[in-house]
Amino acid sequence: MRDILIGIDAGTSVIKSVAFDLGGRQIAACAIPNIYENEGGKGVVQDLNRTWADAAKTLADLADKVENLARRVAAISVTAQGDGTWLIDKNGDPVGKGWLWLDARAGETVERLRGDSGDVARFSHTGSGLAACQMGSQLRWILDNAPEMLDGATTGFHCKDWLYFKLTGKRATDPSEAVFTFGDFSTRTYSDDVIDFLDLKRQRGLLPEIVDGATTQHALSESAASLTGLLAGTPVVLGYVDVVCTSLGAGLYEPGTDTGCSIIGSTGMHMRLATSPADVQLNQDLTGYTMCFPVAGHYAQMQSNMAATLNIDWILSVAGSVLKSFGVEKSKTDLLAQMEDWLSEAKETSLLFHPYISEAGERGPFVDATARASFVGLDMNHGFADMVRAVFDGLALAARDCYVEMGPLPARVRLTGGAARSRSLRRILGGALGASVQTSEREEAGAAGTAMIAAVSLGMYGSMADCVREWVTPYQRSPESVDAGMAARFNAAFPQYRQSRLALRPVWHTLSHGSAPVSEQERLT
């Protein structure tokens, strides 16, 4: 009996395969830490063959946990970290290493393209702001600076596309990543106007066919079957990009509810659901993402902070370094436990923190590769606990900054990602957004989301709404209500947060380039 669905989720930190029964209950999971490396000052890359080998091993390892796995698998579905550029040649072999979303080499290319008047039209097609993490920007940088990197390349993939190719031999990408980089969200197809704007017309042949896993499957190849121990011919589904799958598994889509979804991990991703092309709300700063959703006519609109828990990691590392200088060794686990005490000790102050700690700058709700973190308002009365609290508040204010660019704040936010386990962060985020916060008992939202696409694609459910009722709704915990006092404090702090980050922007550019950008009005005066 084929009674198991496998969801592969190849993230930035971990590659995992998760087995579910047909009703959405998690049965078993196998994971391997992912490995990527820095290249030069701004490059971040990953080995394609090792990524496939690791993903295949997680599938093979599931057989040790699930009896008679191969004959029970109804389908395999794959999602992975988004953006980046993974090139292969005509034989299917890698051309160099895959560029990740963390790669910042195309930062200046993005600045130049965003300054072009044609970017307004490009944005109207894709619904997504240009960023250094995207394949279009990265290909443009390669052509301008190192065109030899494209020698022999015949197909440009993202991570999940590469794994799908190794599973099936099919060169394809899904509607979400294809459209927000090179397409038109209203038609879910590639846009020649967008490709022309990026000056990539000659590279058009690198773009693979768009395949919608919600309606289409391909068969597991003989070679992939041999490596994984699964049966050749098993249906394989190309899932949507990981943030879409995670939002699906976490509960962004539930007809009749006013719900947003935030993923607070290394990055912060904040989403609203648009129920038609006309419902998509594009901001004037030409930022954010509009991602096709695996439901006809629906889109996940997203504004994404480049760094979320990376800011917490940073403040912990500062504490650890200071303690170590006095001969005290503390593990990250110890420091995380201490963090709750610091948060309880912190005073209610006006101290602000802008959480732009990533060397790649910021991409939502504005794009600026030079953006950097800062405390604003420090004085002699502030201690380390106040700085820790300011970091948490900064993450919450950055989330609000993202949500207001997509329309009214949601009444409820479904929260997932590693930081969702922090009660303090949930309370602070709820106050900043004025929304109840709800988490799920299901930890593997991304793998569940891609498996849900397979379940609908294979006709196990008549609609995604039917699937959600079994796979998502039963796992939702009771919502945590808003702290009214905290909400009032954040309402007062938010305008100051926005004003100070706008004022600091010329300073970031000065630090990065040696001089601040000058507006046309300033030149005339």
Image (cartoon, helix red, strand yellow):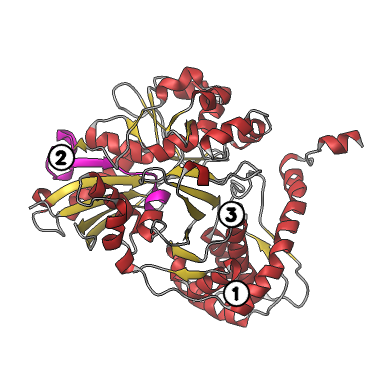
Estimate how packed mark 2 is, as few (under 14), some (14 to 19) or many (20 or more) residues with alpha carbons within 10 Å: some
Amino acid type shown at disc 1: Phe
Q: In this view of the protein, which residue sits in the foreground, 470 or 161?
A: 470
**Which circle's residue, 2 or 1, is located before the other in the chain?**
2
Position of residue 341 measured from the top left corner of the image (x, y, whole percent): 55, 81
The residue tagged 2 is 225
Q: Secondary structure at mark 1?
A: loop
The spot of residue 75 in percent (x, y) is 19, 46
Task: Tell me the residue that label 1 is attached to.
Answer: 326
Mark 2 to mark 1 CA distance (whole Å): 55 Å
Seen from the viewer's position, the closer of residues 307 and 214 is 214
* Dot 2: element: helix
Q: Is residue 358 above or below residue 513?
A: below
Q: Against 245, is 85 above or below? A: above
Distance between the Cα atoms at labels 2 and 3? 47 Å
Range drawn in magenta: 220-246
